[in-house]
Image: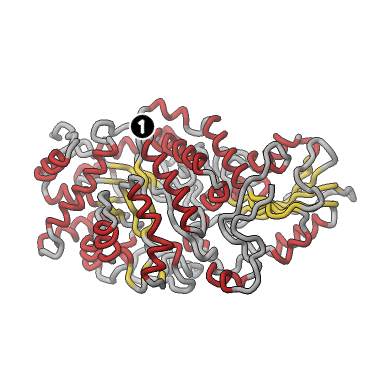
Amino acid sequence: MSASPVSPGTTRDIDALLAEMTLAEKIGQITQPEKNSIPVEDVTRYFIGSVLSGGGGSPTDNNPANWAEMVRGFQEAALKTRLAIPLIYGSDAVHGHNNVQGAVLFPHNVGLGATRDPDLIAEIARVTGLEMLATNVHWNFAPAVSVPQDIRWGRAFEGYSEETDLVIELGMSYLKALQDETPRALASVKHYAADGGTTWGTTRTYDWVFGNWQAADDRWSIDQGDALLDEATLREVHLRPYVAAIAAGAQNIMVSFSSWNGVKNHANHYLLTDILKGEFGFEGFIVSDWMAINQIDRDYYTCVVASINAGIDMIMVPYDYKLFINTLTEAVEKGDVSIARIDDAVRRILKVKTWLGVFEQPFTDAALLQEVGSAAHRAVAREAVRKSATLLKNENNTLPLAKAAAPVFVAGRGADNLGLQCGGWSIEWQGGDGAITEGTTLLEGFKQVGGSGGIIYSADGHFEGETRAGTGVVVVAENPYAEGIGDSDNLVLSEADIALIQRVRERVDKLALVILSGRPLLITGQLALCDAVVAAWLPGTEGAGLADVLFGDYPFTGKLAYNWPRSKAQIPLAALKADSEPPLFPFGHGLS
């Protein structure tokens, strides 16, 4: 029989609950498996404190109602334990509740940085929180407060900007809005520390890590690499967002896979305990990243002991939770991890669960389900698309496009492809191609806003007959990617995209280039062919927002949150700053 649910409201209550707990119950709270790796009955058996969905960790029939039912099953199992301590379910809702088909997907952070609009960012966080909570997901692994210094990084699109102050302004707006609503959601500020400051070519592979994704893909070159920085630079560029986050009420911080000067962050006591918990006064709990502790050492026992003793409070296992539980239990029994360190970790977790309100309300209001993907939520995303679109060049009055006038040639597979405009972390970890979820493609938006009669579309730019158009719009796109699979030292347009631009240029009087990308791309060689250039970033599901600005219903207001390099020689940012030539478009550039 399980006990009645405990509802600790004070430090004394939490300490009383902690005093009742066995070692097994405490270690269960520290353990976070992935939902596909644990049957619901083991949540009860092992007193599990948290379960997560990784990218693509969805129910078989992926829809909001099934998500709510899936998560409810894990929570019900947690409430069957002796002390009925609820779990918190986590998911990477990094641009909306993006694992859920039918949810609204917002522009990725690289685009939101161009909006310079903290009020809009707060509204995005509010909508994301509601759509998460509708599915019983209380914990969002966002916001990223990365400060990317090298756009070759496959996670650059997760950073609002290369400038720390802008990251702080927008990241704190997101954090506060997500956590200050009722019911509230838990944010995870990530990835501590300097995930955006690693050096190209420093990513290691680990032959002892089971299923190591890096070993099977040689594109990983900077993600999870080594930040070769002095401490003054670390603090000024990469740590200030965490100081701001703690002041703004951060309750959880996720550790970065990466290293600082050769020491894995997951084993760095100085970074985690001395600085974060000691100097910065962080009172919430620290969570590891996906299987990241396994990279510390070939010996798993050493990994567990080093990470917990360094200051990590919850381990994202995510697969073999029994091995982790048995290993940590052995470490405590041997005295290699003190019971005081275990108690500190569990106290921090229970304190956050109390703050979150899951003791009183482990399940959220089912009525929220009707809000997932609602017209009101999509309107917020459409506004975000409008405000993130950045006009880099506009000559010969090319933009705005005229409505219902002479034909407009539209070309490029990115013009009619939801997967390409959403990018990575969209339904699946690496994103997808085509109609991956509900939404409006750019082409559909063009027809809605500009009138379908004037739009002639060809994916490959081969338009029938000899007819010319006054204006052509070519949409080029990066293929979706996430994390190190997106690491690239060759940020140029593909040969096919260059040929497409040239082909359409020959058939139109004026040409506008629209770029769907998670970072600036090298377009210096194509710039002269284009009368107008728009950086649309990765706009998400509401492509009509781009049509709103292309047809002039709203002005372009986006301003670059990254310098746009002129050549490969200006990457990374340090090289650009050292170069005698200016960037192609500087930080803050954006026409209206």
Drawn side of residue 438 relative to residue 5, left or right: right
Q: Report the residue at 58% width, 69% height from top.
A: 576
Which residue is label 1 attached to?
182
- Residue 312 visible at all: yes
Q: Secondary structure at mark 1?
A: loop
Q: Position of residue 378 (x, y in %)?
A: 55, 35
Q: Position of residue 28 (x, y in %)?
A: 20, 49
Please state which of residues 124 and 360 is positioned toward the viewer in this rendering. 124
- Residue 70 visible at all: no
Q: Crowding at label 1, few (<14), some or many (≥20) Cα neighbours within 10 Å?
A: few
Q: Position of residue 170 (x, y in %)?
A: 47, 48
Drawn side of residue 543 relative to residue 134, left or right: right
| Residue projecting furthest to the top | 367
Question: Dividing the image into 4 quarters, which one contains the N terminus?
Answer: top left
- State which quadrant residue 234 falls in: bottom left
Q: Report the residue at 18% width, 33% height from top.
A: 5
Q: Report the residue at 57% width, 41% height from top.
A: 384
- State which quadrant residue 58 falls in: top left
Please state which of residues 103 and 164 is positioned toward the viewer in this rendering. 164
Q: What number of labels is visible?
A: 1
Q: Report the residue at 46% width, 44% height from top.
A: 99
Q: Looking at the picture, does residue 307 appear above or below residue 102? A: below
Q: Position of residue 439 (x, y in %)?
A: 58, 38
What residue type is disc 1 on? Thr
Q: Looking at the picture, does residue 399 appear above or below residue 149? A: above
Display coloring: secondary structure
Please state which of residues 563 and 215 is positioned toward the viewer in this rendering. 563
